[in-house]
Amino acid sequence: MAQSVRAGKFDVPLLYEDNHLLVAIKPPNLPTQADRSGDKDLLCILKDYIGQKYAKPGNVYLGLVHRLDRPVGGVMVFARTSKAASRLSQAFARHAQDRRYLAVLQGRLEAERRLEDWLRKDADGMVRVVSPDAPGAKRALLVTRPLACRGGRTLAEVALETGRSHQIRVQHAHAGLPLWGDARYGGGRPGEQIALWAYRLGFEHPTRREALLFTAPPPRAGVWSDFEEEIGKLL
């Protein structure tokens, strides 16, 4: 589907649409859903798109089944029916999907690693590594695989085994490999864009039971441009 939705300074490419699903690429720095900032968010943008396209009066239904942090971009799926929302939410809860990220790490990751930590989100909104018996601690697992090392940085492919808030950012920082441009957990500087991108999303269609797979490359800008060749081969 070669189409996009324009909303202010954001351009939202659409990858797939049918009666049950809408798959889009979330631009970096656009909230997934409404937050305290009051800024326009992706969910509302896509609801407006559906309402205008199909002349639907009133509040349009669009189910949010997973999220990306505001500074992070990449492939997302939304449910256009309650049945699809229920089935997709169950699939995401079971991690019955192929969800992978690209990240640029500060430092050299020499070999594939499986990171296991216990995380807790505190009242200040920060997620921290804590002991397994700490109140509110949740187990976090991911696999990070180096694709290329250049200039003291590593392009890595990350696959989640759990879906904790800020998991990729916190676990890599705790492992001594913070994400490039991560102002919250990695010492990113003003003007740097976090190098984390949801590049691959595969799942079973909620009604047709067929396998769907969507991919999208990160922007050809910033630190990503150092790894264009490797990203091109992957996609």
Image (spheres, rainbow, N blue to C red):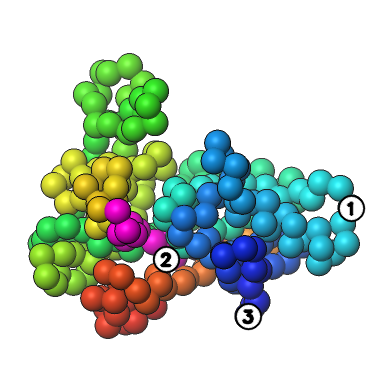
Q: Is residue 172 visible?
A: no
Looking at the image, is mark 3 or mark 2 earlier in the sequence?
A: 3
Question: Which of the two residues, 168 or 86, is positioned nearer the viewer here?
Answer: 168
Q: Amino acid at mark 3?
A: Ala
* Secondary structure at numbered mark 3: loop
Q: Amino acid at mark 2?
A: Tyr
Quick check: is 47 in the magenta stretch? no
Image coordinates for residue 166, horizontal then vertical, percent: 36, 42
- 89 versus 222 height, above or below: above
Image coordinates for residue 107, horizontal then vertical, percent: 12, 58
Label 2: how many Cα within 10 Å (few below 14, some 14–19, many 20+): many
Looking at the image, is mark 2 or mark 1 earlier in the sequence?
A: 1
Residue at the location (27% across, 69% down)? Answer: 223
How far is mark 2 from mark 1, CA to CA? 34 Å
Q: What's the mark number on residue 57?
A: 1
The residue singled out by tag 3 in the image is 2
Q: Nearer the viewer, mark 2 or mark 1?
A: 1
Question: Which of the two residues, 147 or 227, is positioned nearer the viewer here?
Answer: 227
Residue at the location (34% across, 32% down)? Answer: 126
Q: Is residue 126 visible?
A: yes
Q: What's the mark number on residue 199?
A: 2
Residue at the location (75% across, 57% down)? Answer: 48
From the viewer's perspective, tell me whether residue 49 is left or right of residue 97: right
Residue at the location (60% across, 42% down)? Answer: 38
